[in-house]
Amino acid sequence: MKRFVSLLMLTFMALAVQAQILTPVKWKIQLEDSGTAEKTLVFSATLDAGWHLYDMNLPEGGPISTSFSFENLTGAKAVGTPVASKEATKVFDEQFQMELRWFAGEVTFRQKIEVTDPQKFQAEGYVEYMACNDENCLPPDQEEFSFSKKDIDVEKTLAALSSKGEEPKAEPQDTVTPEEPAEVEASTSATPEYVPEEEPQVYQSEDLWMPVIDELKAFGDETISATDTSWLFIFFAGFAGGLIALLTPCVWPMIPMTVSFFLKRTKDRKKAIRDAIMYGISIIVIYLVLGLLITGIFGASALNDLSTNAIFNIIFFLLLVLFAVSFFGAFELVLPASWTNKLDSKADSTTGIISIFFMSFTLVLVSFSCTGPIIGTLLVQAATMGAAIGPAVGMFGFALALSIPFSLFAIFPNLLQSMPKSGGWLNSVKVVLGFLELALALKFLSVADLAYGWRLLDRETFLVLWIVIFALLGFYLLGKLKFSHDSDLKYVSVPRLFMAIISFAFAVYMVPGLWGAPLKSISAFAPPLYTQDFSLYDDEVHAAFDDYEAGMAYAKQHNKPVMIDFSGYGCVNCRKMEASVWTDSRVKDILENDYVLITLMVDDKTKLPEPIQIQENGKTRTLRTIGDKWSYLQRSKFGANAQPFYILLDNEGKPLAPSYAFDEDVDKYIQFLERGLKEFK
């Protein structure tokens, strides 16, 4: 048992450790030599769970498309354009007002080339691409490739050309010529200088480009030392679901019945306790295996696709509505009684561990009508978070919470006497869960609505529905709303009264949102603020500088601290932060009066005056655009590459506080800004 727990802990710890420099796309570039004059360049991309890679030739004004560029193509010519191995997922993006296409999991692009002179063959270039997940968009990145005559069979290629009656000839170089750079003022053109390999990097503004990663870690920077906590959230969500399931009419009465069954099996109390603990472990194993099977059947990439696939989100919406209707008492979701009877008889006819295992399986089936909707909601949430082991982690948390009471009551049977008896209160728990299921269902309908651009569930419509749902929940708790299977409520208990107050208060809290109030506490569920047709909340913040060195020079001249906003034209969450956080009057006042705000677009495609070569992680990279330059600044100086990314500096380029990533909590953002001001003063 100790080994099993240790293994689980080590597994979770390994999954949690993840550096902030994200590399969600792994490229493998090969040259397929068919022995003829026609060759194929194969670009294979493997994406981490939760990430997607944009398709080629997206419309202007959207995120960066995947593109394939030849800087030098000698002795050969390109034939056609690259072809993807599968069809891209299509989603209408409300932020960009256009249909976007992307790939998840794995995708391969194939570009044919025709060799005309094998002796002089050389193909050099790069793939430019952009990757995003539900929270971050990384700046455009490049993967370079280079092939020469050493990578092809020269003799076979010459023979193939001769058989076609063609003489080898050198084709004009098919190269991509950089566009003429726009004129850049002297104060804004400082760039990293070329650095020979194995020598320290030197910049024109050396101190401003000096890495400060260690200083940020000294501040306790959680973003730089980030861990992927999505699995932790799923675990606690599952654990909470298991605790809720204990209060349902299908599970609660089985606690004393099951514990009594184990205590009667033997007069040896120690053995009875061991059996009860084994019973709890069996419940955990059953649910854990179920979660692993779901991941194994669908796969990590498929689970990730669920988070953005409109059809699946509609299915989830309908599924949760079905669960809600079931909890309201319209019908019961039950498994065939024959399944339960067979397992029950197996538990009685067998002995030892096998008997205990069948008993736990019986509990799982008997309680399905109550736990099924909770488990279904949990698996939906785990799938849409894009975590590969999400279902397994969620089921582990659910089973752990469900199994603990059975073990505890077996060890301390006197606790059973203090348990409240079954009654109408258990049915009330189901109805309350039904209201919550109905509210959660709207979140998934909202995702589909945004994807297709229907505009059926704009923010104010969503809020109206939530206000009505939670108001009705309050009336139900007060006994003013009654379903057919509810028992009479002679009086309102104190817990029901406080729950009703909370429900009504929450409904009233959402009312100002109909006129554009941010409602930060539900921002993760409600549609974005830009879907609101009528809003009185209209105030934007614009950066004074879009160049790092120019902004730092101004800050030094006026002795003010700096906030750098690493952003991107294709960064949806950057726009969300600007719309829901920067528009707060307190935030706006601090940014405009107390800081020098510098916004650096990491996907700015404006060409640099000339490409710059830098050494990074033992690899030579070429910075070709202004966006490349700012992306390199973020990686090299701050050790991060996801946007949005906010960093507070003094006018010497030293950090004043930990960095800040995507979090729409206004109060937290103000604390972040005020901490920097305090440190600067």
Image: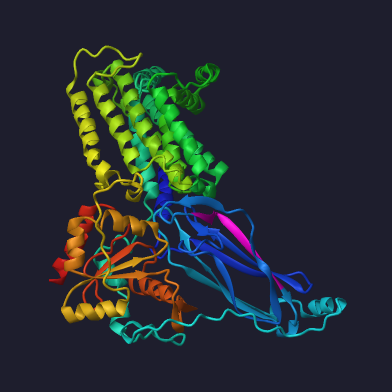
Give percent across and percent down for residue 268. 37, 22
Residue 248 position by quadrant: top left
Answer yes or no: is residue 518 visible. yes
The residue lying toward the viewer, choosing from 438 and 237, is: 438
- Magenta range: 99-113
Where is residue 237? Give x, y as percent. 36, 40
Q: Is residue 324 above or below residue 80?
A: above
Residue under the point 40% across and 71% down: 631
Residue at horizontal 21%, vertical 12%? 490
Q: Residue 386 location in percent, x, y?
A: 46, 48
- Left or right of 495 in this view: 482: right
The foreground one among 602 and 265 is 602
Was residue 332 drawn as part of the magenta stretch in this picture?
Answer: no
Q: On the rendered structure, is 520 left or right of 613? A: left
Q: Residue at x 25, y 54 (%)?
A: 538
Q: Main secondary structure of the magenta part?
A: strand
Q: Position of residue 164 (x, y in %)?
A: 85, 76
Q: Residue furthest left?
A: 681
Quadrant placement of the N terminus: top left
Residue at 65% x, 83% y is 173
Asked which quadrant contains residue 420, the reply is top left
Between residues 554 and 654, which one lies in front from this camera angle? 554
Q: Is residue 107 highlighted in magenta?
A: yes
**Viewer can see residue 349:** no
Answer left or right for 137 relative to 150. left
* 313 up-or-down from 413: above or below: below
Q: Quadrant of residue 251?
A: top left
